[in-house]
Each structure stands twice: as structure tokens, then as C-alpha cells.
Image (cartoon, rainbow, N blue to C red):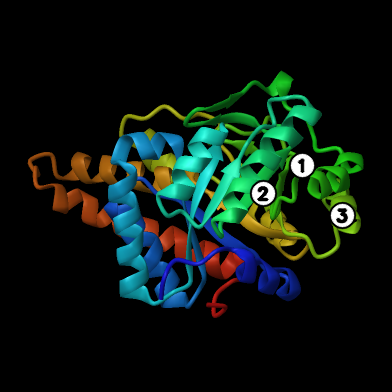
């Protein structure tokens, strides 16, 4: 089975009231942990690569590892560019075999966002690749994406129909109160489900994407702090809120920070308990198992996409 686009995935997810997990990948062990969990649960997958991951691991290496994941699992897997910030970056990913790209021009004025997104859509569609765009701005930090809380803005439902019609985009990431990174909220998180509901009403059947949706598992935050870390107050989006979003118009939920926390916490604990170990397999193996545990939980208990491959 070759890499697939997200078109059929999202159609089934919208109709079935669940979401597909879009998991950020940076190395072999993270890819293996994600794919093993999805294979266990017979779930479709989106493996996504940020601009930072491309620089770190090299696009060719990442694509070959994702192709290996398809070959060994037999799952429907899409390879997606996360937060592409220019036409040139999106074009390069299309040309190198990605099946989905995100153009994030949300930092630009509305009209310019439309123009940039339309340019990407036209090129991608000519090559059989689907496109995600963003309307509204999420606060937080993730790789090269840095938005101060004062500059964040909710998606305006009055703009979504015009944006989709003028750009021809295939899915839309909206801002309803989630945030990139592990330090998300002061006090109880509040997501604007009223905005999500209104967007769904104005774009019936259209797939919506939720970024900044890591829940920041406290078991890993505690391990990091126990073994020399400093993450006071780290918290994420309650998983019951994510499940609610998945039952509405949201067809894709991005998960990155939770995987990073699982890997980092596991490696910190391993070296604290086994300071003489120096074989990378001794600590990367447990880190891979931690990723598998997190992803399996997300697929079954949050996304609801188990058995949907």
C-alpha cells in the first residue's frame, strides 16, 4: 500500500464522529512507537513532519522511515508537512513525495493568507496532494512556531466560508483556545466549542483540524521534575474536551508535546536508575515503548479511531 492522502480518512472520520491522530515524528524510535500502537489498534495514521524535524533528521531519511512504516504495518498512512510557512517549503515537500501539506499563513492579514494559501493549493492539487491551512492564531511555542499570548486570536466564523471557497483548501485548522507546547493555561482551560459549532454549521461536512491539543500527561511531567527537570505548572487540554471536539467537526487532532514528554521522561528516569548505561538501545527502547503507550491511549480513549483503518 502506498502513502495516502487524508481525503478518505477525513470523510469517514466526519461521518463517524471520531478524529485521526496526527503525530509529529523526529526519529526512528518515535515513528516505530506510533506505528506499533496504530497497528495494535488498527487505526489510520497521519505522520507529520515540522520544518524543524526536516532540518534535524533530513527529509529523505524521514520519508524512507515513513515508507517503511507503511510497508511493515499495512495501515493507511498520510505523510504531512506541519506548519509550512512558505510556498517554497510546501512545494519542496510536494515534490519530495508528501501526500499532505499545511500552509500556515495565519500570521498574515486575511487577504494575504488567502492569496498564499491559494497558491499552495493550486500547486499541490496539480500533484495530487491535499492542503491544510490555518485561520486564527494559537499561542505557544512549537519548533519555529512562536506566538505570544497577547498576539493569539480566535478564528472568526464569519471568515471561514469565504476563506475555504477562495482558496480551495481541503481542511482548516482553527483557533478555539488550544495552545502549542506544554505550558498552556493559567487556571482551568476553556475551549470555545461555540466557535467550533458555528464553524461546523457554516462548513457542513468540511474537516476541521485542532492544533495545540496535547494533554500533557502529568505522570511524565512528574518524572521529568523528579529527575532534574523544571516544569512547574505544565498542563494541557483535558482529554474529555478533545473527545468532544472529535465528535463534532474536528477530523484531525495534532499531538506532539505528549510524545516529547514521554520520551524525555523515560530517558531521564533510565539514566537516573542506570547511570552506567551507554548503549543507546538501552534507553531508546524504553522511550519507544513509552510513545507506543501514549499513542495507544490517544487512539482508543481520545480520538476514537481504533478499528477504523
Marked residue nearer the N-terminal end (1 or 2): 1
Left or right: residue 228 compared with residue 212:
left
In the foreground, 299 or 114: 114
Residue 47 locus on image (x, y percent): 46, 56
What residue sits 59% from the left and 54% below the top? 126
Q: Secondary structure at mark 2?
A: strand
Measured as percent of width and height from the top left, residue 91 is found at 50, 42
Q: Are marks 3 and 2 in contact (CB under 8 Å)?
A: no
Q: Nearer the viewer, residue 267 or 16?
A: 16
Pointer 1 with pointer 2, Cβ within 8 A: yes
Q: Residue at x 49, y 36 (%)?
A: 89
Residue 139 visible (yes or no): yes
Q: Which residue is mark 2?
A: 210
Residue 49: % across, % down: 44, 46
**Disc 1 target residue:** 176
Q: Is residue 105 left or right of residue 202?
A: left
For image coordinates 14% across by 47% down, the residue present is 280
In the figure, residue 183 lies in which quadrant?
top right
Residue farthest to the front? 126
Disc 3 and disc 1 in contact, CB within 8 angstroms: no
| Quarter assignment of residue 189 | top right
How far apart marks 3 and 2 lie (CA) works out to 13 Å
Distance between mark 3 and mark 1 Cα atoms: 11 Å
Above or below 67: residue 234: above
Q: Residues within 10 Å of mark 3 (few under 14, many from 20)?
A: some
Q: Which residue is mark 3?
A: 197
Which tag, 3 or 2, sits closer to the chain's start?
A: 3
Amino acid at each position: 500500500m502506498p502513502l495516502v492522502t487524508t481525503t478518505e480518512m477525513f470523510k469517514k472520520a466526519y461521518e463517524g464522529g471520531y478524529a485521526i491522530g496526527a503525530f509529529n515524528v523526529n526519529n526512528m524510535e518515535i515513528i516505530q512507537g506510533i506505528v506499533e500502537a496504530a497497528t495494535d489498534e488498527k487505526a489510520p495514521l497521519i505522520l507529520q513532519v515540522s520544518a524543524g524535524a526536516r532540518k534535524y533528521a533530513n527529509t529523505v531519511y524521514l520519508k524512507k522511515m515513513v515508507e517503511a512504516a507503511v510497508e511493515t504495518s499495512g495501515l493507511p498512512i498520510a505523510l504531512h508537512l506541519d506548519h509550512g510557512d512558505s510556498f517554497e517549503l510546501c512545494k519542496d515537500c510536494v515534490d519530495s513525495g508528501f501526500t499532505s501539506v499545511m500552509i500556515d499563513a495565519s500570521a498574515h492579514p486575511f487577504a494575504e493568507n488567502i492569496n498564499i494559501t491559494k497558491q499552495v493549493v493550486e500547486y499541490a492539487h496539480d500533484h495530487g496532494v491535499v492542503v491544510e491551512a490555518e485561520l486564527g492564531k494559537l499561542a505557544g511555542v512549537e519548533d519555529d512556531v512562536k506566538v505570544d499570548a497577547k498576539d493569539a486570536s480566535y478564528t472568526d466564523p464569519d471568515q471561514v466560508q469565504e476563506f475555504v471557497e477562495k482558496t480551495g483548501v481541503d481542511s482548516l485548522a482553527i483557533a478555539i483556545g488550544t495552545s502549542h507546547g506544554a505550558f498552556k493555561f493559567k487556571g482551568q482551560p476553556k475551549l470555545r466549542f461555540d466557535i467550533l459549532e458555528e464553524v461546523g454549521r457554516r462548513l457542513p461536512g468540511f474537516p476541521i483540524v485542532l492544533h495545540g491539543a496535547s494533554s500533557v500527561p502529568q505522570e511524565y511531567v512528574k518524572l521529568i521534575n523528579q529527575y532534574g527537570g523544571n516544569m512547574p505548572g505544565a498542563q494541557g487540554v483535558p482529554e474529555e474536551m478533545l473527545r468532544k471536539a472529535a465528535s463534532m467537526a474536528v477530523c484531525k487532532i495534532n499531538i506532539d508535546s505528549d510524545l516529547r514528554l514521554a520520551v524525555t521522561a523515560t530517558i531521564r528516569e533510565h539514566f537516573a536508575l542506570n547511570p552506567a548505561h551507554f548503549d543507546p538501545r538501552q534507553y531508546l527502547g524504553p522511550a519507544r515503548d513509552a510513545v507506543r503507550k501514549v499513542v495507544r491511549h490517544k487512539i482508543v480513549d481520545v480520538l476514537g479511531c481504533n478499528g477504523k483503518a
